[in-house]
Amino acid sequence: MTFDVLIAGAGPAGLSAAIALKKADSSLSVCLIEKSAEIGGHIVSGALIDPKAIKELLPEYSFEDLGLTTPVSEEKLFFLTEKQKIAIPFVPFLLPSKNNHGNYALSLSEFCKKLAEIAEELGVEIYPGFAGAKLAFENQKLVGIITGDMGRDRHDAPKSDFMPGMLLRAKQTILAEGARGSLTTHAKRHFNLCRDSDPETYGLGIKEVWEIPAENHRPGFIQHSFGWPLDGKTYGGGFLYHFGKNLVSYGFVIALDYKNPWLSPFEEMQRLKTHPAFSEHFKGGRRIAYGARALTEGGWQSLPKLSFPGGILVGDCAGFLNVPRLKGIHTAMKSGMLGAEAILEALKNNADQATTFEEKFKNSWLAKELYQARNIRPAFAKLGTFLASPYVFLDETLFRGQLPWTLHHREEDSDSFHNADEMPEIIYPRPDNKLTFDRPSSVYLANISHDDNQPNHLLIGSTQTWEERNWDQFKGPETRFCPAGVYGAEPNPDKPGYHILQISPQNCLHCKTCVIKDVRQELEWIPPEGGSGPNYGNGM
Ligand SMILES: Cc1cc2nc3c(=O)[nH]c(=O)nc-3n(C[C@H](O)[C@H](O)[C@H](O)COP(=O)(O)OP(=O)(O)OC[C@H]3O[C@@H](n4cnc5c(N)ncnc54)[C@H](O)[C@@H]3O)c2cc1C
Ligand code: SF4
């Protein structure tokens, strides 16, 4: 099958690109594939949306029609110690990155469904349940994507319902896979797209949705926290948004350059809920959804080349998220829209590469926003929370991001662990199953569907290097950082003193943390059969 434009990924970036393309030229054939069984099924976000890009893309729709029904009405920012909360006096002018006035709290999964409806009405062909497995090249040009085979058994042999993957050809391909996309990683290597950029750094976001009694619900109330339970050298914090019908979105984001291999992001997220600043919001409520996803934190200085022969990168797979604002939706949308403009020009001129994307980006509000925010995340990495805070005041408040230097990211997240025997072991409290929970009961709420009888999509590489590096040096950090408990380490019965890695791929939430944080960078994450993985709903 051949299209003018093929898009991989139905997040805000891919869907905005699709809509922008068809709005500009309804005669184009635009195809979009999505690996989740339904649109929105793999989407995890806060989400507070800055409606800037929506106003540009869909001016003919009211916010209400698009599901933006909970405007932010009250906001709080806390620095937490184990027992205390210190409210940071909030003056929007002084802390512009924390100002959410004019933003809306929503479920991004639902919003993507709405965008997909609009795209389909415009004539975009959308195929959920199809994972892009491989890139197809001809003469050093990307010519399309090969979708994954369906119906192979765990030994890779075809089953009775076997359907081989298809080559979807396109004049231009848009990769919109979100953070650490598998096709994107391949394209970045193939075209050396990161040759002039800093290493990409990431965070892991873990989220729950709660339904609470109507009398406790405060629509539009939002809160962010930093400090406890993280130490001063680890970047991250919590968020809590009241939205929709009696729903509360609670989440925790931790930068994946954390140093202590004993740390478990999942357990940190659970114990943050017990702090009085958060626990009061869950009273009388019940948890109805759980999910996790990596997000990009490199920002301006980690952006790769945006175009290459035959395609472009948009959204989180390029790294357009504004980290201090924890906002990547409007930036993903805008990057999709700018990418669409560049592709239209390339198609019109019969050019192989949408080279004008870079320039369009540099001249947009998106570039201005990311440039202004560029020093905040690296300042925290270099200085830690306490020293970075006055620096942020200087950089963000006084100089509005215009200081004449750019701080750099020096290290890949996979290099940040210190040896396990040099770091304090962390003993986490047991869950009470009312406010705090374990991983299996959490994963249950992600509605995963994954046929066990299919090839393993998590290729861990050499077991010897796993033993020597991951186990001996770091005591199996994947058993703690995977938010789904996919990895376990058991004593090796044949080799006393050694351990073997156990994998339960059927629990995978597709968050991508293991590929980012694997200390050997040998682990490969291959998209499993299309339609596998979580089926997020319930306000995710
Ligand atoms: C916990 C958390 C909280 C956040 N809070 C906020 C917030 O409050 N406000 C905000 O603005 N931003 C927030 N963000 C960031 C925001 O969600 C992302 O920046 C944004 O979703 C990026 O959009 P995207 O389209 O690039 O990627 P994604 O939203 O990740 O979408 C990518 C899509 O591509 C699909 N896909 C991936 N690979 C393939 C493949 N090979 N084949 C087919 N399909 C594929 C995925 O299944 C997915 O549906 C948050 C993120 C997290 C994790
Ligand atoms: S196996 Fe990897 S991608 Fe899957 S949930 Fe665990 S860390 Fe995330």
Image (spheres, rainbow, N blue to C red):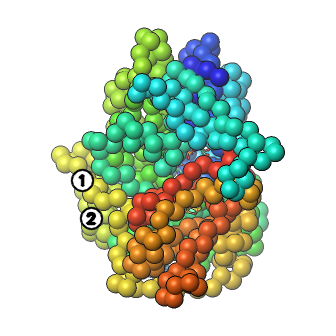
Residue ID at (58%, 85%): 493
Q: Quadrant of residue 234?
A: bottom left
Residue ID at (59%, 35%): 146
Quadrant for the N terminus in the image: top right
- The percent position of residue 330, horizontal first and vertical second, equals 51, 40
**Which residue of the protein is positioned furthest toward the left in this rendering?**
404
Foreground of the two, 448 or 17: 448
Residue ID at (77%, 66%): 213
Tag 2 residue: 382
Tag 1 residue: 407
Q: Quadrant of residue 457?
A: bottom right
Can residue 51 be seen here? The reply is: no
- Image check: 275 left or right of 282? left
Q: Quadrant of residue 413?
A: bottom left
- The percent position of residue 291, horizontal first and vertical second, equals 64, 60
Q: Is mark 1 within 8 Å of ligand 1?
A: no
Residue ID at (45%, 35%): 313
Mark 2 and mark 1: span between their CA atoms? 9 Å
